[in-house]
Amino acid sequence: MRLLFLVCLLITCNCFSAEELAAPARLVLSLPIDYQVCQRATRDQGTIIVAGRWPDGSIDGAWLEAKLVGAPAAQWQHLCVRKQGAKEFHCELNAPAGGWYRLELHAKQQAVVSAEGSVEHIGVGEVFVIAGQSNSANHGEEKQRSTTERVAAFYQGKWQLAHDPQPGASGNGGSFIPSFADGIVKRFKVPVGIVAAGIGATSVREWLPRGTRISNPPTLTGNVRQLPNGDWESTGAIFESFTFRLRQFSPHGFRAVLWHQGESDANQKDPSRTLAGELYTQYLGQLIQQSGREVGWDFPWFVAQASYHGPGDAGSSDIRAAQRALWDRGVALEGPDSDALIGDMRDQAGKGVHFSGAGLREHGARWVDKVSPWLEKQLAKTDKKPEQKTKIAGPSTRLGLAGADLLVEGHAAFILIPAETNRANPQPWIFYAPTLPGLPDEAEKWMHERFLAAGIAVAGVDAGEAYGNPASLELFNALHRELTQNRGFAKRCCLLGRSRGGLWVSSWAIAFPDRIAGIAGIYPVFDLRTYPGITNAAPAYGLTPAELDLRANEFNPIARVPALARARIPAILIHGDADNVVPLKENSAAFVRCYQEVGAGSLVKLIVLEGQGHNFFEGFFHSQALVDFAIERARAGAVLER
C-alpha cells in the first residue's frame, strides 16, 4: 500500500515541469519607487510608470500583470508583452487617484508566474515643487511633521515621508511644507508629493540661466561672477540644478511651482545690492519662461509676496509691487502675502526673519487657501463632460470618405474611419489641422485614402482661426478625450499640420508630448511672426500686439521646438524654397535647426521642393515619404500602448 502511494505521488509530481515547481524569481524594478506620488491627470485617474528588467530566462511573448491593492475594485491588469530579445520593460498602469496603494506585479510565461515584485506605498495625487529662499526651505524655528503621513518628498532618486527637514532644500530646521501638503491631502483626499528646492539667502539673480547679465550683484555672490569689464552675470549653477530636478518628471508630471523669495533682493544693508522692483519682475519672469523651455513644458508658478526682514523692516513696497505685477500680467498665479505674518509668527520671539512653529503652520495654511481654488478649477476641466457636448452629426462629409461628422464642445469635428477589416484596438490615428470649412480638401484626398487603406483613422476639430492659442489646445484635448475614452483610439497619435495648421499641432505637441508619436507637416507654420504675424494673431490670444510680442517666446512654437527634440518626437516636413507666404528659412528649416542644436537632427527629415511656393503642387500632397512616415508613426503610437 505504501509503495502504491509513492508511485502515485511520483506520477503526480511528474505532471509539473521544473519551471512550474520553482519558486518565482524577484522582479528587478526601477519604477515606481516606494512612497512615490504620481501626478494625476484627471480628478479620478493618473498613470503609474512601471519599469524594470525581465527575469533571466524570459521568453518572447512573456507578459507582465499588475494589481493595486487598496484601490477600488482591485484586480490583475495586463500591462505589456515582452518583445523579441527585450531585456527591460517600460509600461503604463492606469490607476485611480488615491493611495497609499500596494503595487503587486507578476511576470508570466506560458501562464506560469515566473517572477514577482511589489512596491509597498504608491500614490496617485498632486505633486508640487517648492522653490525660493530660506522661508521656502528648512530654516523655520521648529521642525514639522506630516500628520496625515500621506505626504512624500523626492530627492536624489528616493521618495520618503515628508517630515522636516525636507530633503533637497537648504537648512536643518522646519518648513511650511508639511502643513501645506497635509492641507491639500485633507481637502482633496489624495496623497501629495513634494520636490523641495529652496536655497537660503538667495537672490532671484542667482537663479537665472548661465551667462544672464544682471544689473548689480546681490549681497552674497557665490552664484554670480564679475566679468573683466566689470559687468555681473549668473553662473547658472542653481538654474541648472533646479531644471535638472524638474526634468526628472515627465511633462505634466507635477502640478505647479510654489515660489517664495524676495527678501534677498529687498532693502539690502548695502543699497547697491538692492534689486529694483522692475528688474525683479523682469528676472523672475525670465526664470519662469526659460525654466519652462529647458524642461520642455510651460508649468504654472505661484508667486508669494515676500520681502520681510524683521520688525524694523516689515517689507519692501517696490518688491511687493514687482511680485504683484507678475500676477497682473498673467505670468504667475497669486501666492500668499507672507509679509503679513508678523509678531509671534516669526522666530526669535517675533524679532527674526524666519517663521516660528505657529508661523510655519499658518504659512502652510495660507498656501492651501491660494492653491486650492485654482486646483479645483484645473480638476473641473478634466471632469467628464455631459454626453450632449460630443455627439454624432451624421456620416462624414469630408472628401466622400467613410467616417463621421460630430460636435465636440459645440465645434464641428470629423473622423475618417478605415474599413472594419482594417481597424485595430487601440485604433492608430492621425490628428489633422487646420480643420476648417473646406479643409481637408480634394488636394489631400490621395493621402487620406492611403491612410485609411493602411488602417489609420484621421480626425480633426474646427478651432477657428486660433493659431495655436490655449483655447484651441483645450479643444484638441476634448477631441482626444472623445476618441481615446469613448472610441478606442490610441492615446498617442501622429500629427499632420498643413500651413497654419503647423501652429496648432506643434503647440499641442509641445504642451502634451506624451500624446504624440510623430509630426508631419506640409509647408507648416511654426513661427507666428511670419504668418499670420503678431498683429493678426494677437486677437486670437486675447492680447494686444504689444503684449503678444512681449510674450512671444511663451506662445510662439518655434521658440519651444527644442522641447520636442528633447522629447525625441520624430518629424517629416515638406516645404517649397520659393514660399513667400510661409518662408522656409524661418519655419521648417528653423524647426530642423532646433533639433540639430540639441543633438536630435536624425529625428527630423526635411524635403525641400525646389521652385515651389505656397501652392497646390502635387508633390506636396502625393508624397509617399510623408504618407509612409505618418502611417508608421500612427502605428507606433498604438503599439506603445499595448
Image (cartoon, rainbow, N blue to C red):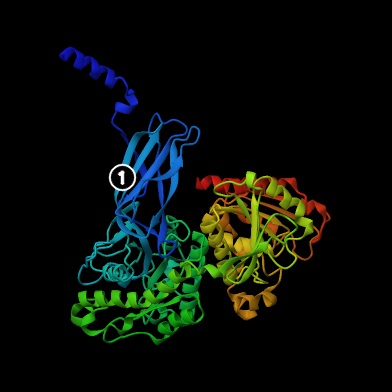
Whether residue 261 is visible, yes or no, is no
Q: Nearer the viewer, residue 342 or 458?
A: 458
Q: Is residue 108 left or right of residue 341?
A: right
Determine the residue located farthest toward the left in the rendered image: 2
> Where is 159 relative to 436, above or below?
above
Residue sitting at x 46%, y 77%? 280
Label 1 sits on a secondary structure element that is strand
Image quadrant in which the N terminus is located = top left
Identify the residue at image location x=60%, y=46%: 635
- Closer to the camera in the image, 286 or 213: 286
Examine the rendered structure and indicate whether residue 7 appears above or below residue 27. above
What type is the residue that disc 1 sits on?
Answer: Ser
Image location of residue 421, percent across then percent down: 64, 44
Q: Quadrant of residue 393?
A: bottom right
Horizontal arrangement in the rendering, residue 558 relative to residue 295 (left or right): right
Horizontal and vertical percent position of residue 260: 36, 73
Of 374 and 80, which appears nearest the observer?
80
Seen at 36% across and 63% down, the residue is 197
Residue 405 horizontal/vertical position (percent): 66, 63
- Asked where in the image residue 460 lies, by quadrant, the reply is bottom right
Tell me, yes or no, if residue 256 can be seen here: yes
Residue furthest out toward the front: 1
> Can you identify the residue that label 1 sits on?
118
Horizontal and vertical percent for residue 59?
A: 44, 30
Q: Name the foreground residue: 203 vs 436.
A: 436
Vertical relation: 583 (above or below) 3: below
Q: For the image shown, how many numbered marks are present on the structure?
A: 1
The residue carrying pointer 1 sits among few (fewer than 14), some (14 to 19) or many (20 or more) residues within 10 Å by Cα, namely: many
